[in-house]
Image: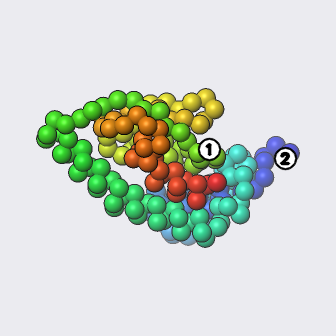
Amino acid sequence: MNPLGRFSPATFAVVLAVYLFYTGSASEYDLITGSIVALMVSFLVGHWLVEDERKFFSPRRWFYAVTYGLRYFLVEETKTHIDVAKRVFTLRANPGIVRIPLDVESEYGKVLVANSITNTPGTIVVDISDDGRWLYVHWIDVSTLDEEEVKENVVAYFEDYAKKMFD
């Protein structure tokens, strides 16, 4: 393989978008310097970041990503913030660590699920098994120890979208 790897259009697009977002400008100077930076990053590490360019540029996957983001931040986060606030005021909690089976295949999907759980109030991923098949989650309300019920309550929504976006 070429010591510089291979050019990755997906990596180029993401790096350029992030560059322009953080500079807050799309001037000619920023487009040129951003493209140079994105080109260098794409050649140096693009082959490690994106395995299949077709998946990255799939409109169906982007549709699921946008749908997931909107629902997660507008609906799921709101519901869990309200739930945790109620628990704080009523002092009603049954915390514990539960083991949850994980059916997502891709590493990016596993990261999405784990980060989504951790960002949701009342839950945090404390460990993932070495084989990547189990999540260990601290949950504010351990109402059951049945793995399928726990999965339905904690990760089913995240995992469903992670599969659609990354697997």
Residue 98 drawn at (x, y percent): 42, 32
Q: Is 166 located above or below residue 86 in the figure?
A: below
- Residue at the spot 30% in from the left edge and 31% down from the top edge: 95
The earlier-in-sequence mark between 2 and 1 is 2
Relative side of 75 to 2, left or right: left
Quick one: 27 or 46, which is closer to the camera? 46
- Identify the amino acid type marked 2: Asn
Instruction: Residue 125: give x, y in percent of width and height.
Output: 44, 35
Q: Pointer 2: what residue?
A: 2
Which is nearer the eye, 38 or 145? 145
Q: Residue at x 64, y 47 (%)?
A: 106
User: Helix or strand or loop: what does disc 1 sit on?
Assistant: helix
Q: Is residue 21 left or right of residue 86?
A: right
Q: Which residue lies most toward the left here?
A: 89
Q: Quadrant of residue 93?
A: top left
Characterize the local packing of mark 1: few (<14), some (14-19) or many (20 or more) Cα atoms within 10 angstroms. few
Q: Which mark is residue 107?
A: 1
Which of the two residues, 38 or 53, is positioned nearer the viewer here?
Answer: 53
Foreground: disc 2 or disc 1: 1
> Residue at image x 67%, y 61%?
55
